[in-house]
Amino acid sequence: MKEKIKIALAQISCKRGNKAENIKKVESRVTKAKQQGAELVIFPELSLTGYTMRDQIYELAETIPGHSTTVLEKLAKKTGTYIVFGMPELSEKTQATIYNAAVLVGPNGFIGKYRKMYLPTHSVFEEKRYFRPGYQTAVFETELGKIGLIICYDIFFPEVSRLTRLKGAQLIVCISASPATRRTFFETLTAARAIENTAFLAYVNLVGIEDGLQFWGGSRLVGPNGKTLVQAKYDEEDLVIDEINYADIRPTEAFVPILKDLRPELFEKLKETAEKL
Amino acid sequence: MKLEPTILDLDWSEVEAKIKRFIKDYVEKSGAKGIVLGLSGGIDSCTAAAISALAIGGDKVFGLLLPEQETYNVKDVEHAKLVAEKFGFKTEMIDATSTLEAFYTSIPIFESTDKICKGNIKARVRMIYLYYYANRLSMLVCGSSDKSETMVGYFTKWGDVAADISPLMDLYKTQVRKLAQHIGVPKEIVTKPASPALWPGQLAEEELGIKYEILDLILYGLEHFMKTEEITQQLSVKKELLNKIKSRWLSMEHKRRMPLTTKIQYRTMGADFRLPRTRH
């Protein structure tokens, strides 16, 4: 496992409903990022299709592995990179059960997927109408370290990142499609999740306008001390690259030993109390 | 939440940027050559036209002045021309009087003393002119409705609110004034009293029975799910007034939506036919 890795945050806008165009854009960004030395290239939530697809999602969802993941696997093999992207996943066992998924592929092909656990269905969001929630966190052991995947609204629930970290993830990748009115929440929470888990956190948000929603971008790589290492522009497409060094976790963890100080008995209390809310 | 004027403050540079991005993005994605606006010389239409010109360039913005004899106000025409000159967009003026007369004389049940019905003809005739120009010039119609008037239904159904985009619709009237100041709309336009110009001497605040400064705070409270008791207490307004505004807001939903049908089949317009706007 490498100790230092170069990560590219590929902040893109999507052509809604046009998977071929979006894949082309993914290919161009991966190629560009690779030329700049990136080993992991991360794209936003539902970057295969665009975020606001409403009823069209039934036509666009695909199984994982499936056609699009195969194309992305080939791209990863060809370029020797790891890629994270978002897509609507059609369950293999049904015809209209869909998950909001994040996929990780690498130079040796398909690695794994994560199904979003917390589906916002309030304000302008209607995810529960279309998606089934996932039930498991996802951490994958790769040549680039242990990588955990979460999606957007999951970041509001510290237990998702915590569980991902406790399963060993040293890098938490959060792909997102966050509209501008929520920027301050995410800017706070990305730092908080990194600090409270003493882990690196890569946040990649969508940009562009879909049905009047303006996605604010501002993708960032956050260190285990909560410091932003690199940040993409607000409101426009961008590609930023930076290196992380997993060895940096140790001094932070020794300085504020959050994982050492965890009190598992509180989790039981939390469960009991939350059930009675 | 404390309902005081500062609660309506926004980062005006950010608001300007967002609205400009929205207009530019929509016009580009639609493939339209630009936008047509009805330019009354009032704060909303002048601000919508000005920010459109800042977004896509004055050469792609077309302001249509549609005065008519009954409500003609030379100041309004001057203001419309002033803002067009300052922000560099083209205008054209059409006297709508004869068109309106044709409607009045051809409608067997027309009653000139019913000023609301008559006024609505004016708003809808303006809409017809705007859409004709938009179709003919391969442009889009940009509306200038604000959030205060849209919430209380202070507009003509299929009239002044009819448009392809309404970039100011998420800003209360007092916020539109702030945005107007921020982007440099001349002061005399920003400070003059609002009027839909449907009949002579019509003033929005008089007709609504409330100043926009208070109305906007009430609406802000309602938007944020505040209880009516809390709003009346904080703003020291009468419960009856608040209930009247709340009831207007709720009862006018029919003006803000596509026509209602009854569900008969699998997926229904306006109900569960939920498609994205992938073309504009």
Image (spheres, rainbow, N blue to C red):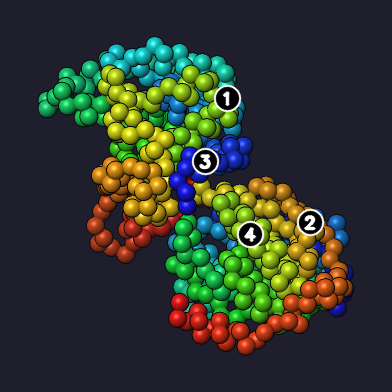
Which chain is indicated by disc 4?
A: A
Q: What residue type is labelled 2?
A: Val
Quadrant holding the C terminus of chain A? bottom left
Instruction: Confirm or deny contact between disc 4 and disc 1 (CB under 8 A).
Output: no
Where is residue B67, by image quadrant? Answer: top left
Instruction: Confirm or deny contact between disc 3 and disc 1 (CB under 8 A).
Output: no
Which chain is indicated by disc 2?
A: A
At horizontal 36% and vertical 14% (from top left) the residue drawn is: B73
Q: Do labels 3 and 1 share a chain?
A: yes
Query: Residue beneath label 3, please?
Result: B6
Query: Residue beneath label 2, please?
Result: A230
At horizontal 63% and vertical 51% (from top left) the residue drawn is: A216
Q: Are marks 4 and 3 on the same chain?
A: no
Which chain is indicated by disc 1?
A: B
Q: Which amino acid does label 1 sit on?
A: Gly
Mark 3 vs mark 2, CA separation in Å: 34 Å
Which chain is indicated by disc 3?
A: B
Judge depth for marks 2 and 4 and give the one in front. Answer: 4
At horizontal 74% and vertical 77% (from top left) the residue drawn is: A258
Query: Residue beneath label 4, please?
Result: A186
Mark 4 vs mark 3, CA separation in Å: 25 Å
Secondary element type, mark 2: strand
